[in-house]
Amino acid sequence: MKKTIILEGIDPIAVYGAGNRVLEEFLTYFPGIKVVARGNEILVEGTQEKAAEFEKKFGELISKARKKPGLTSYDVESLFDESSSSHDFALHGDAVIVHGTDGKPIRARNARQQEMVRAYFNNDLVFAAGPAGTGKTYIAIALAVRALKNREVKKIILTRPAVEAGERLGFLPGDLKEKLDPYLLPLYDALGDMIPVKRLQEFMNDGTIEIAPLAYMRGRTLDRACVILDEAQNTNIGQLKMFLTRMGNDAKFIVTGDATQVDLPNKADSGFISGMNMLKNIKGIGTVIFTDNDIVRHPLVTKIIKAFGKEGR
């Protein structure tokens, strides 16, 4: 289906942004549509459903441009996320958290993920424990991205201990970032699903999004930030305490881990579960426990984890 949208009574630059930056950001939410901008005409080609959705949202963008001169990419992001209020999350936990780079909404997929979303809005510190594939880290990052887009925080900090999963990688070439990237790939993958590549690179270059090993948290005070500690089962109790005491004003902390996947030389050194149990009754700290039944990856993952768990017992 082909459709032409005419901009009437408004300068196209006010809608497209300088260098078409606002329009380019808008188009990232419609990857399946072909769009050509020619002056005050927008030529749209795609399925009837997608074209209609594009026209509706583009009309909302024009309305924003009439009310607020100098649109930014944040205005585009809010256009797609403003339907999901904190109140909706606190009550239901199943509203859209953010829209992915493919335009699809990202929301809690089961009751346990909904519980995690509610815990985030009702507490400043959340522990999420459970097996691989339950979406703990993915939901945590989605909540952090949402907070950044809504300007509830000024930065996102993602950290995890640099512990090898049963392998010895030996010497790794490159600078510090290149040495650490193999440990942090799951975090990059999740961010890439939610933030366009160009924007993500800008955020990382200016420090708005920071991905760092746990050791780099020592001595810092993290104000107005959403901070996620992933793979927390590979921290000892001292490291966990060090991380948690970095919490500054207006900060949100999320700690995720899987007690069955401890990669420390001595598995008994893990302080994740003991630290979580030590703090679970403190007001302002939420605890969510995922089980095998909450796995959202391939159906075989659930069977694999149950089989290994049975053998381990």
Image: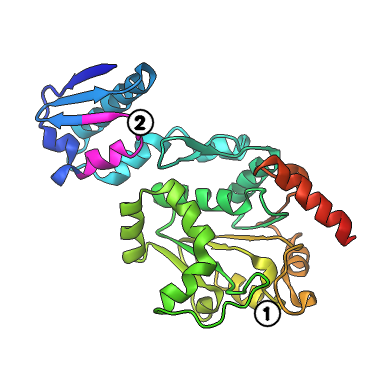
The number of discs equals 2
Compare residues 16 and 225 and report the one nearer the observer.
16
Check if residue 28 falls in the magenta segment.
Answer: yes
Which residue in the protein does label 1 denote?
238
- x, y (%) of residue 45? 27, 23
Residue 303 drawn above or below residue 64: below
Q: Which residues are magenta?
A: 21-35
Check if residue 102 falls in the magenta segment.
Answer: no
Residue 291 visible? The answer is no
Q: Which amino acid does the dot numbered 1 rest on?
A: Gly
Report the Cα–Cα distance between label 1 and label 2.
49 Å
Which label number is shown at residue 279? none
Q: Secondary structure at mark 1?
A: helix
**Are there few (<14), some (14-19), or many (20+) residues within 10 Å of tag 1?**
few
Which residue in the protein does label 2 denote?
32
**Are there few (<14), some (14-19), or many (20+) residues within 10 Å of tag 2?**
some
Q: Residue drawn 90% across and 60% down?
A: 313
Q: Residue drawn 63% across and 64% down?
A: 231
Q: Are marks 1 and 2 in contact (CB under 8 Å)?
A: no
Q: Secondary structure at mark 2?
A: loop
Left or right of residue 60, residue 122 in this image: right
Residue 4 drawn above or below residue 105: above
- x, y (%) of residue 272? 72, 68
Residue 176 drawn above or below residue 56: below
Left or right of residue 313, residue 272 in this image: left
Q: Residue furthest right?
A: 313
Q: Residue drawn 76% across and 65% down?
A: 273
Compare residues 15 and 186 and report the one nearer the observer.
186
Which quadrant would the N terminus be assigned to in this image?
A: top left
